Image: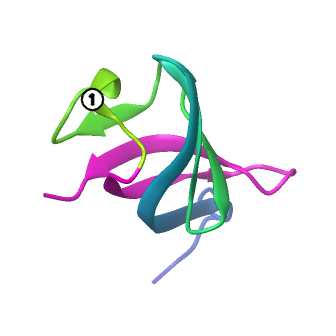
Amino acid sequence: EDDDGDDDNESEVRGTVSLLTGTCPGLTFTVAGTRVVTNAATRFENGACSTLTNAMRVEVEGIRRSDGSLLATEVEREL
């Protein structure tokens, strides 16, 4: 499989939301020890941005930033 390098910073974390702050679409929270940031481009699956709560199990896909945080491209609530 060829890798063109475009997805070198893509990452995924799964776990429980904690330390949730902010207002939609600009949320910040922690999943499995990783700081996650959402923005207007973040897609939310199985629930809207406004339904995200602490203790909710999610899978987050996104781009790893230089500070170690994850800029979420997709947040999927695990049902």
Residue 30: give x, y in percent of width and height: 59, 52
Q: Which residues are magenta?
A: 55-79
The number of numbered discs placed on residues in the rendered structure image is 1
Image vertical order of residue 10 relative to residue 53, above or below: below
Residue 7: give x, y in percent of width and height: 59, 60
Q: Is residue 25 left or right of residue 76?
A: right
User: Crowding near pointer 1: few (<14 within 10 Å), some, many (20+)?
Assistant: few
Colouring:
rainbow
Residue drawn at 54 percent across, 32 percent down? 38
Residue drawn at 19 percent across, 34 percent down? 47
Query: Residue lying furthest bottom in this view?
Result: 1
Asked if the stretch drawn in magenta spans residue 27, the answer is no
Query: Residue lying furthest right in this view?
Result: 67
Position of the N terminus by quadrant: bottom left
Image vertical order of residue 65 relative to residue 15, above or below: above
Image vertical order of residue 73 relative to residue 48, above or below: below
Identify which residue, 16 or 78, lies in the foreground: 16
Q: Is residue 52 left or right of residue 69?
A: left
Position of the C terminus by quadrant: bottom left
Asked if the stretch drawn in magenta spans residue 73, the answer is yes
Residue drawn at 57 percent across, 64 percent down? 11
Q: Which residue is mark 1?
A: 51
Residue drawn at 52 percent across, 42 percent down? 72
Image vertical order of residue 16 relative to residue 20, above or below: below
Residue 53: give x, y in percent of width and height: 37, 38
Identify which residue, 9 or 4, lies in the foreground: 9
Residue 46: give x, y in percent of width and height: 15, 42
